């Protein structure tokens, strides 16, 4: 018996592509709701506590004051809190303060924009034309695109913005003979390794350094080593996987979904042909590309966030619809249909944020941080920095936001480095590398569950793909920060 055939038969596509998109593993919605229940249960077990907060002008928000931790009256989260959590993930039902509602609305506007673009036929025709020109050299798209996403991650913390690229890139990757996981990995791992090796990222490195009371340039050489080394490791890993999948599609971790993915993302165009773009389609593609360029410019230099990005995509959709002469009815129906396609992703964002809301209301985050503070006291350099890394790994699951974790943990944990004879800049590096590593798989991070939902890749299949890379990166990070402890 062919051993490889025996191993992969169960993952081969069936005769029903619609069924192949399903998986026995729970959906993202179920996973996130179960995590809400789990965190709510922890609020009954972990004592409630808080640090005093004071305003840090450099960080621009309140930070914890070391040595002020005290237990407070518990606020365990019950059935009603769990039921409210998905709503609270979007906005505070008492104060009406926004949580993740802006991200969810941005996703809907993005879906509408993509729906209008699809109605012009420009994306489909452009993909087939590009693949014809790249024939035989498709593999080099992977390191080039991953480098671009990594640059976004290391400079301005590119994360939620990447959700705009999945529906565009995945059809190109599938057309090239790879699979949906390859497309997801290029974006998620590419931007993720950039955040892991943040050099001047204002939402991670700069905030963390300010909270640790050091210049953000301290430790930049070591972080650059993490960035370049990590990018080489990740690009090589994804290229190796993609090459293997193209040579033998049955070795894809989503081989069973192959036909369904092709039907969904390529709309039945399995054979690539050299189609010529019309003049109108070329103009539509130019506006399409300019929209993303303007988005990146706005986020990186003008302080834009979700509302302005949503407005940009909304306006671009109208301009493209007018230029393509879609007409009022087709323009609006295409926009609504596109938004409907990403409605599930928008709901996932609210559920993921609901987990953080439960933890904040249950007041257990500071207790976890205080436990870490007492654990690290008096350790030698090597043990201190490696344990610091693992503590930040654990906290990242509960606080996926890089800026949120920096403000929470750095004022408390960074000063401990003085007693361990370790530079505070190394603590910042350990924090950001831990947060970046966890956010490649973190189910509480909207970017992960959102990207997987757009790519129609189930969470278990993503774990099957990425776990060896996580082990490699963990060893690499540990080596780098251990060397840094002795420099």
Image (cartoon, helix red, strand yellow):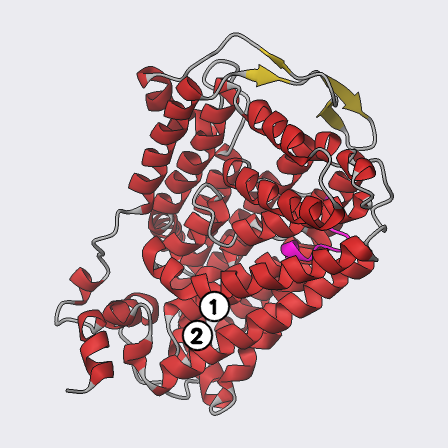
- Residue at position x 29%, y 40% from top? 30
Q: How many marks?
A: 2
| Quadrant of the snapshot with the N terminus | bottom left
For label 2, count other residues whose C-alpha is less than 10 Å away and answer few (under 14), some (14-19) or many (20+): many
CB under 8 Å between callouts 1 and 2? yes
Image: magenta residue range? 194-202
x and y, in percent, of residue 189 in the image: 54, 62
- Report which residue position mark 1 lands on: 169
Q: Is residue 355 left or right of residue 295?
A: left
Decide if residue 177 is in sight here: no
The quadrant in which residue 38 appears is: top left
State left or right for residue 487 relative to residue 79: right
Which image quadrant is residue 121 in? bottom left
Q: In this rendering, does residue 60 appear at all?
A: yes
Instruction: Determine whether, in the image, residue 78 is placed left or right of residue 256.
Output: right
Q: Residue at x 69, y 32 (%)?
A: 407
Q: Is residue 257 magenta?
A: no
Classify the position of the C terminus by image quarter: bottom right
Viewer-proximal residue among 241 and 86: 241
Element under disc 2: helix
Q: What residue appears at the point 13 percent right and 67 percent down from the top-left corner?
A: 16
Give the spatial CA distance, label 1 vs label 2.
Answer: 6 Å
User: Of the numbered discs in the image, which one, if any, rests on residue 173?
Assistant: 2
Relative to residue 142, is residue 476 depicted above or below? above
User: Helix, strand or loop at disc 1?
Assistant: helix
**Residue that lies at the very extreme toward the left in this rendered image:** 15
């Amino acid at each position: 018996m062919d051993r490889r055939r025996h191993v992969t038969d169960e993952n081969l596509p069936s005769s029903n592509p619609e069924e192949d998109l399903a998986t026995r593993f729970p959906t993202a919605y179920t996973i996130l709701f179960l995590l809400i229940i789990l965190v709510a249960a922890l609020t009954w077990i972990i004592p409630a506590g808080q640090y005093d907060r004071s305003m840090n002008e450099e960080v621009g928000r309140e930070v914890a004051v070391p040595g002020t931790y005290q237990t407070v009256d518990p606020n365990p989260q019950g059935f009603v809190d769990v039921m409210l959590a998905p709503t609270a993930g979007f906005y505070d039902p008492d104060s009406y303060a926004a949580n993740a509602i802006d991200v969810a609305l941005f996703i809907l506007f993005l879906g509408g924009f993509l729906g209008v673009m699809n109605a012009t036929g420009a994306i489909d025709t452009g993909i087939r034309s590009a693949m014809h020109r790249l024939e035989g050299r498709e593999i080099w798209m992977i390191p080039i695109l991953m480098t671009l996403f990594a640059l976004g991650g290391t400079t301005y913390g590119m994360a939620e913005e990447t959700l705009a690229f999945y529906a565009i890139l995945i059809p190109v990757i599938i057309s090239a003979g790879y699979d949906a996981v390859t497309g997801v990995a290029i974006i998620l791992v590419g931007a993720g390794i950039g955040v892991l090796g943040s050099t001047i990222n204002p939402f991670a490195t700069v905030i963390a350094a300010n909270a640790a009371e050091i210049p953000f340039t301290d430790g930049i050489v070591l972080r650059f080593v993490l960035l370049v080394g990590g990018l080489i490791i990740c690009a090589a890993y994804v290229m190796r996987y993609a090459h293997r999948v193209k040579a033998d599609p049955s070795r894809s971790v989503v081989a069973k979904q192959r036909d369904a993915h092709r039907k969904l993302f390529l709309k039945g165009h399995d054979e690539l042909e050299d189609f010529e773009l019309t003049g109108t389609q070329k103009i539509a593609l130019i506006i399409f590309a300019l929209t993303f360029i303007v988005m990146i410019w706005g986020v990186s230099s003008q302080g834009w966030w979700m509302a302005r990005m949503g407005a940009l995509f909304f306006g671009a959709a109208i301009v493209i619809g007018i230029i393509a002469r879609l007409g009022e009815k087709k323009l609006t129906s295409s926009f609504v249909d596109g938004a409907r396609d990403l409605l599930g992703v928008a709901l996932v964002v609210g559920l993921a944020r609901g987990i953080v809301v439960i933890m904040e209301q249950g007041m257990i985050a500071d207790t976890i941080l205080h436990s870490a503070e007492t654990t690290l006291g008096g350790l030698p350099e090597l043990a201190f920095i490696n344990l610091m890394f693992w503590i930040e790994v654990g906290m990242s699951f509960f606080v996926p936001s890089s800026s949120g974790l920096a403000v929470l943990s750095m004022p408390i944990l960074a000063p401990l480095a003085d007693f361990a004879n370790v530079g505070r800049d190394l603590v910042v590096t350990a924090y950001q590398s831990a947060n970046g590593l966890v956010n490649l798989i973190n189910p509480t991070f909207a970017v992960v569950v959102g990207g997987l939902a757009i790519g129609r890749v189930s969470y278990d299949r993503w774990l099957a793909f990425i776990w060896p890379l996580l082990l490699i990166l963990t060893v690499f990070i540990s080596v780098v920060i251990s060397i840094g402890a002795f420099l």
